[in-house]
Image (cartoon, grey):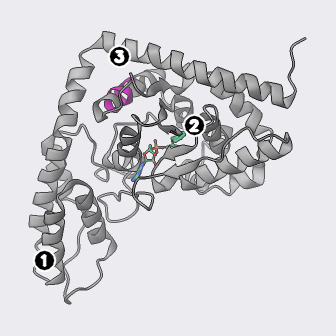
Amino acid sequence: MSIVLSGIRPTGNLHLGNYFGALKNFVKMQHENECYFFIADYHSLTTHPTPADLHGNVRQVLIEYLAAGIDPEVATLYIQSDLPETAELYLLLNMNAYKGELERVTTFKDKARKQPDNVNAGLLTYPCLMAADILIHRSEKVPVGKDQEQHLEMTRTFARRFNRLYKVDYFPEPVAYNFGEELTKIPGLDGSGKMGKSEGEGNAIFLAEDPKSIRKKVMRAVTDSGPTEMNQAKPEPIANLFAIMKAVSSPETVEYFDDQYNKCTIRYGDMKKQLAEDIINFTAPFREKVKEISADEDYIRKVVKTGKEKAHASGAKTVREVREIIGFREF
Ligand code: TYM
């Protein structure tokens, strides 16, 4: 039995990348482990949402988590700002994190490029807050997609540094976790990079998206003019379509189109039609659940309250012990 934690920023609806990178693994693990799943609303402040957006997005992501199969009776499902001890641990970790190493983080460099007018300190110290999220429950496994690998590496560095500095063996060194051998990266539909909410219109397919819109997005996905040689390697946009298909379609379907590709007889239009229908089928139960849960305000309130209490029990204990280790003592 391990302590497992994962999280997501409330900056839009859940997409297939969120599901296959993190949620699916988490949902599988929740019954055999001590699991924490949280909504990273402090993190989302790095991009300055309005108060209305912040609350609405947290609510939506919470509903979608539940719809995706997180059982709040089994796992601890909570909102990050409901555990303000996270902020204290973040402050303490910041004291032993260095400007140079933070500036080298790829996601920081990307964000600084994308929002040059808003390179705030929260962006720079994002890995410290993420480490606080993880270490506050002394988590050992973190189901995430490949995009979070470097953040996990930083978390291990901070955990090790803390242990060395105070000559303790307190924090574990958490590992990024996926049931497959490799961490997952679900690509987007625009022919390059990962599926993500900030990667541009039409790039991501959301779990709660209506079938019409799914069809439209998939049919518009970037392809090329087709293979000209038998068994030739797939260029990125095509490999991406196959990667998404592998996630949602049956192995027979993937094999069929793979075969067609290798024989140069593939028709991308047919492949996309099939892919769209498979995504629609795959996400259908999810859409139903979202509707059901959205209508039950009492249930949502109860889930949030229970999550807050359970997260506090674990998080407050860690911060108490960390204070003791650092040397804050009661008079
Ligand atoms: P976020 O909100 O970008 O994404 C949430 C989760 O979804 C995964 N993911 C993907 N996996 C595979 N392919 C993709 N295209 C894809 N897009 C997103 C992410 O890896 C992530 O697991 N910094 C985190 C949130 C966070 C967190 C944490 C996660 C804050 N503190 C502590 C784990 C532990 C983030 O921005 O994820």
The kind of secondary structure element at disc 2 is helix
Residue 223 forms part of the magenta stretch: no
Q: Is residue 208 above or below residue 230?
A: above
Q: Residue furthest bottom?
A: 229
- Give the CA distance from mark 3 to mark 1: 47 Å
Residue 320 locus on image (x, y percent): 74, 22
Disc 3 or 1, which lies upstream in sequence?
1
Whether label 2 touches label 3, CB < 8 Å: no
Q: Does the residue at mark 3 contact the one at mark 1 (Cβ under 8 Å)?
A: no
Taken as a whole, is the magenta stretch helix, strand or loop?
helix
Residue 222 in the figure: left or right of residue 142 = left
Name the residue tied to disc 1. Answer: 260
Q: Amino acid at mark 2?
A: Thr
- Name which residue type carries label 1: Gln
Dot 1 alpha-carbon crowd within 10 angstroms: few under 14, some 14 to 19, many 20 or more: some
**Distance between the Cα atoms at labels 1 and 2?**
46 Å
Residue at 38% x, 36% y: name it: 12
Please tell me how many numbered marks the rendered image carries.
3
Q: Which mark is residue 46?
A: 2
Residue 80, given in percent of the width and then of the height, sits at 54, 27
Q: Residues within 10 Å of mark 3 (few under 14, many from 20)?
A: some
Disc 3 marks which residue?
Answer: 300
